[in-house]
Image (tube, grey):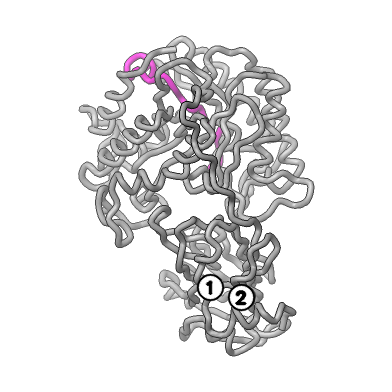
Amino acid sequence: MMTRPINALVVCTLFSLTLCAWATQPGDVVFETDFGMQTEQALWSKASYAQWMPGPDSVTLRIQAAQDRASASHMISMPLSLESWRGCQLLFACRVKAQDVTRPAQPYLGVKFMLHYATPSSGPVWLNENDVYGTFDWKTQSFTVRLPDDVNQADLSLGLQGSSGTVWFDEVRVTVLASPRPARPVPMENPGPAFRGHDLPRLRGVMSPNAFDKESLRVLGQEWHANLIRWQLTRNWGKAGTERDLEEYDQWFAGKLADLDLVLEACKEFGIKVVIDMHSPPGGRYENSDLAIFHEPVYQDKFVALWEQMARRYLGHPAIWGYDLINEPVQSKPSPPGVANWLGTQVRAARAIRAIDPTRPIFIAAANWDSADGFRDLDPVDVPNVIYQTHMYFPHQFTHQGVSNTTTGIKFPGEINGKWVDKADLREHLKPVREFQLAYNVHIYAGEFSAIRWAPGDSAYQYLKAVIELFEEYGWDWSYHAYREWDGWSVEHGPDPNDHTPTTEPTDRKKLLLEWFAKNVKP
């Protein structure tokens, strides 16, 4: 059995089903078990496919799923009371070994070491490493979470989902990474104007297609009257293990900059401001979606050098609104010594840009896919002329139905995951962003938001209408995802997922965007 403090053993394993209330400082162990005692095993639910087996040091949990049962869920769980750790950042880790675990249909399936909770502010949350399958010897599987202030009960699960094969678990541990954050400052009564980097009433536009097309930019700027585009430098989105060869990456990046040169000149002609979005940074993403730039210095250094290159290349260009440093940062494991984390990496790049260009707006992204929830773990950065960005895909089960999950027919407003969700819930979800905006008198940019076009009835329209109204109420600039990219997000296509031809009559979603774009003032 592993060595542990005796009070952790008593508090955590004697049927209390709670975390250790004395552990509140960074480095404190909140919960740990190696399954070596029957009292530890009794915390978990029972199932015929789960067995306690002799392990390297004590006992392991073995879970087996037959090939003809691969589509089913093979997990056991234990309840956790998280109330005492509201606001803490926790690291969940375990040891895991697998044999012949088949690749699941979705990246979040496969080997599951998962935390699940639901709160009024966040809705249902499931946290685990993605893309864990195959055959491998003992290794660590982990994820981090900043617990919301209204969290209570949760479930911790171990097993297989959507895969067949055999998996072993051992040495489950939960550690405090950071204490609860101090309260946000009280907003000033009469704050001055926040830095926006433009003098227009509002910037409203879209996410870009993946390649330069002057006619599409002309339509966007002149016919649709958009005055903003978030131009993505992207490829291999979501494909783990790419962007690792820096020589090959440089060749690709040079081609993207040549493309961007054409984009900027066309946007200047058609009255469109440009956000340059580093969508696919060097090193790419790991299988768990972490960006390599948060863990490997060679890629972090290259990332900073690329932003220095662009800052010199585009110094003073009138079409650029600003530089979007990182798209949707994810970091489930701490950075190694000497390597900056998800926020520190952005600060490194921002300061490098500031040494070349003292005024161009720089966008700082929040953690956890640049979500509203990520603003709970965000501090203002000590860099001048920054704007803070958020993305809005809540509730994900609705916006991405039929994309990253197979369930469709989910309506908005309507019942989602057993709870009625409407505009008030969207407002509550965005509350951490709004509180950050008011506490620090900063400007917010909603860089991405969308709803899949085959959402039932007029649900996509109703969702987009509610979201845009909130953005406008809060004074945020925004860009819809996406314009003439993948047609699943296209407002020029109808609700039939099998129809890939734009409609002859404008959709209600397109009309909605055009109504807002009509209010734009051109730069």
Give x and y (percent) for residue 422.
28, 48
Residue behind mark 2: 169
Marks 1,2: beta carbons within 8 A: yes
The residue to which callout 1 is attached is 158
Question: Taking 506 as reference, is 450 left or right?
Answer: right
Residue 229 lies in the magenta-colored region:
yes
Q: Position of residue 248 (x, y in %)?
A: 69, 35
| Cα distance in 3D space between marks 1 and 2 | 8 Å
Q: Residue at x 53, y 73 (%)?
A: 158
On screen, residue 271 above or below 378? above
Residue 510 at x, y percent in the picture: 28, 29
Local crowd size for mark 2, using a 10 Å CA cut-off: few (<14), some (14–19), many (≥20):
many
Residue appearing at x 49%, y 77% in the figure: 76
Name of the residue lying farthest toward the right:
338
Whether residue 100 can be seen here: yes
Depth check: 189 or 296 in front?
A: 189
